[in-house]
Image (cartoon, rainbow, N blue to C red):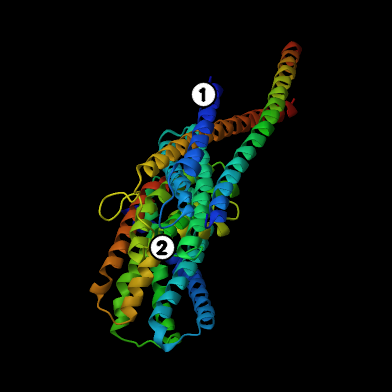
Amino acid sequence: MEHFDYLFAAYSIIFLVIFGYVIFMWRQQARLEVEIHAMEERLKNLKTTQSSADAKSAAQK
Amino acid sequence: MKNKATAMLGWSTLIMMLVALFMVFEWVPTEEDQGIVQRIFYFHVPCAWVAFAAFGVVAISGVFYLWLKEQLFDDLGYAAAEIGMVFCTLVLITGSLWAKPIWGVWWTWDSRLTTTFILWLLYGGYLMLRSIADDTPEVARFSAVIGIVAALDVPVVVLSVRLWRTIHPAVLITRAGEHGLEDPRMVVTLLVSLAAFTALFGWMLMLRLSQLRTRSRLMIIRRDVALIEAAAGDY
Amino acid sequence: MAAFAAVLRKDLRVEIRSGQSTIALFALSLLIMVVLVFALSPQPADRARDGAAALWVALVFAGMLGATRSMIAENENGCIRALTLSPIDPAALYGAKLTAAFAFMAIVEVAAVVLITLFFNLDFGADLVRLAPSLMLGTLGFAALATLLAAISSRTRAGDLLLPILAIPLFIPAIIAGVKSSEAALSGFPLAAASQWLGILVAFDVLFVTVGALLFEHVIRED
């Protein structure tokens, strides 16, 4: 079992790095989803207020 | 539908990875000259393969982006470069961990080591451009150009560095034209690891790509919101 | 062809009137060599190797500065926008910029060769003439790459930092080949001794001049 430490280190680093990257992706995904929902909500609100504003200005004419 | 495919690929990657690990640590015979550290090889080579494949995807998506101007190819290039960089880093680390007990040094300026290191620098620069220039609209075009130029640089790098020096063991294809793995079980283990890593690459690429697609969509929505808000300010 | 000549003439005229990039390039390469002399403390036995190394370090870093300066000047006064709006073939524009960059660097290199001869106790003679092919090929490759990359880096934030990060890894094969062939020339070997290295430099030049001419359009076009 000579140099087992090198072998162990190599395989642990491979899995640590890959897991680290996957976790980074997952966290970013969660953040993106929150933000995109918020933005879509805002866009919907804006569109309704805008269309009512359009209707108002049309009525004034 | 797409999520289902990603999940299925993810589970099969996990299973293949476990099988590969079992083969590497339990099943395959120990190589006589190098002893137990030789087993690093079974994951070292697949990491290199994924890195090269990923950098290839960067170049191809760069060509397609400049040609078709589809945001998809920009996102694909970004995702592949990032994943390629992760695996290129792993190649360098695992290579070092093998070299120390076998060659007695962590690092030497051998041709394959040097080439891999130059690749690492090249795509490090590419990702640096991406992160620094994130706020300019031209970044997609710039990155596509750099991705293509970097890939074209690789053959010249290989040529010049090979002429410069080489001591890396030629395991897969030796000078006699045969491979240097004496036991057929070693070949099988390597092939299973390669398959597992290819699946892992596909899975990570799908995950990261769909994420970058979401990000691009978010940018568009943000722009729309800003436009409407600006227009609303005029009332 | 007329467009190529016009843009080249403009760049050369600006340079002749101000002398800005050539002087900056020369000053920087002089300083790099001074640093290297103290860093290496040249020994007579290694003078060919040290001289070749100093020459290429100076070439790479001074060239980077020159390329950045030239593209920043183009962007500052909006000249590059005017050039891209005009019906000039981007490849001709690239060719003109490349030729100008090559010319400035070549002038500075003549001075740099004189400097290394003095600093590293080399002889003025045929060896220096044999240096020409390796230096000229290396300069052409560097100018080809730097012209393309400076167009990118000059339009991004922290571009002066980005240019070396992008350019140096790409330029490594030419650095290896250039240093080896320059060392052979300074050690008094005939040109044939470095033919493999010169071949790599030629391949590098052909590749990057072509790629630059083809891709320059995608870099400068505004959408």
Screen quadrant of the C terminus of chain B:
top right
* Label 2 chain ID: B
* Label 1 chain ID: B
Mark 2 residue type: Asp
Q: Position of residue B78 (x, y in %)?
A: 52, 41
Mark 1 residue type: Ala
Q: Which mark is residue B110?
A: 2
Q: Position of residue C147 (x, y in %)?
A: 44, 57
Assess disc 2: are there few (<14), some (14-19) or many (≥20) residues with their C-alpha within 10 Å of its C-alpha.
Answer: some
Q: Residue at x 44, y 65 (%)?
A: B109
Figure check: C51 above or below B38: below
Assess disc 1: are there few (<14), some (14-19) or many (≥20) residues with their C-alpha within 10 Å of its C-alpha.
Answer: few
> Camera-side residue: C47 or C161?
C47
Residues beneath discs 1 and 2 located on the same chain: yes
Tag 2's secondary structure?
loop
Figure check: C98 above or below B46: below
Q: Residue at x 35, y 74 (%)?
A: C182
Figure check: A17 above or below C102: above
What is the distance, in whole Å, between disc 1 and disc 2 at their CAs?
41 Å
Q: Residue at x 40, y 47 (%)?
A: C215
Mark 1 or mark 2, which has the lower sequence index? Answer: 1
> Camera-side residue: B106 or B149?
B106
Relative horizontal placement of residue B177, taking residue B104 as reference (left or right): left
Res. C77 visible in picture: no
Q: Position of residue B157 (x, y in %)?
A: 38, 57
Q: Which residue is mark 1?
A: B5
Res. C193 visible in picture: yes
